[in-house]
Amino acid sequence: MKQATDARSSRRRTLHGQQHSVARRRVVVRVLLIVSAVIYLVPLTFVVSSSFRTDTNMYNPTQWIPNPFTLEHYSNLFETLPLLPRYLWNTVFIAGLSTAGTVLSSALAGYGLARFRFPGNRLILAGLLLTLMVPPQVTLVPLYIAFRTVNLVNTPWPIILPVFFGTPFVTFFFRQYFLSLPRDFDEAARVDGASWWQVFWKIVVPLSRPAFITMAVLTLIQQWNGYFWPSVFLKSKEQWVLSQAMVSLSGQYASRQGEIMAGIILMSLPMVLLFIFAQRYIVQGITSGGVKG
């Protein structure tokens, strides 16, 4: 009887110790998350605050809350950049078309690598993984020569076409996600007479909505904020995107600091809102994509 009582007491102490250990780990994790959030939010708060400050208080370190509060930088932005609506349209066109092509083409390629076994399947996958290690800037010179030969420099197409037919990372992500889906759905649809195209569109795509939303949002953000490739291929101001327009506000001898901050806020706001609305699908898509190798 005494031994049973001692055993129960030992189990209670062990359970109590485990609960305290879990509680301590949670506290440590939450503290680290709070510190990380503060580190991220401080520069963001500075940008937002600076966009509403007057030029006199622009570099005042105590002006976290603008006093006086002004919207002149936002109004001046449209005067300084009269082609701003044009830049917005160029950015939407390039980012939207690039995202649509990348997601659709990569999903089709990823589905083929995940579901079909054919000669060279593993070799293609190995080549795909190897290309992830090569910086895209390596292809700059041959791409520029190719697009200049067909007179497409200073048009959106040199930025859209290289990613329109899929990218290695997005293709590999879709392959991993499709591997986590049971094959029973595909086989049942095939038994009922569905083609592989119908299986993909009517079964796989609806089941993979988190993956599609995740890659669409991440690709759109990357294309929206892109500066390197537009700065190489888009020469005339009429073809600029928003990132080029923001950089143009910073001159060699003087910069329009308030307008730059206002432009950053206006440029970032659509992507921030998009990420907030899609974050649930992004977390689900990323976690599901790494389930099976």
Image (spheres, helix red, strand yellow):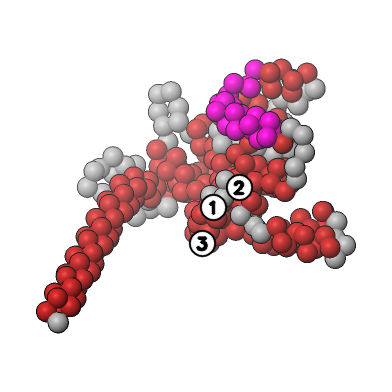
Circles 1 and 2 in contact, beta carbons < 8 Å: yes
Q: Which residue is mark 2?
A: 176
Q: In the rendered view, does 141 fall on the left or right side of 6?
A: right
Q: Chief secondary structure of the magenta span?
A: helix
Q: Quadrant of the N terminus?
A: bottom left
Asked whether the residues under the numbered discs 1 and 3 touch, taking CB atoms below 8 Å apart as contact, a structural biologist would say: no
Q: Nearer the viewer, mark 3 or mark 2?
A: 2
Q: Earlier in the sequence, mark 1 or mark 2?
A: 2
For mark 3, what is the residue? 280
Q: Earlier in the sequence, mark 3 or mark 2?
A: 2
Q: Amino acid at mark 1?
A: Val
- Residue on which disc 1 sits: 291
Question: What's the residue at 82%, 60% (across, down)?
Answer: 190
Instruction: Write down the region rendered in magenta.
Output: 122-141
Crowd band around label 1 with a 10 angstrom C-alpha radius: few (<14), some (14–19), many (20+)? few
Is residue 83 positioned above or below 189 on the image? above
Is disc 2 placed on a helix, strand or loop? helix
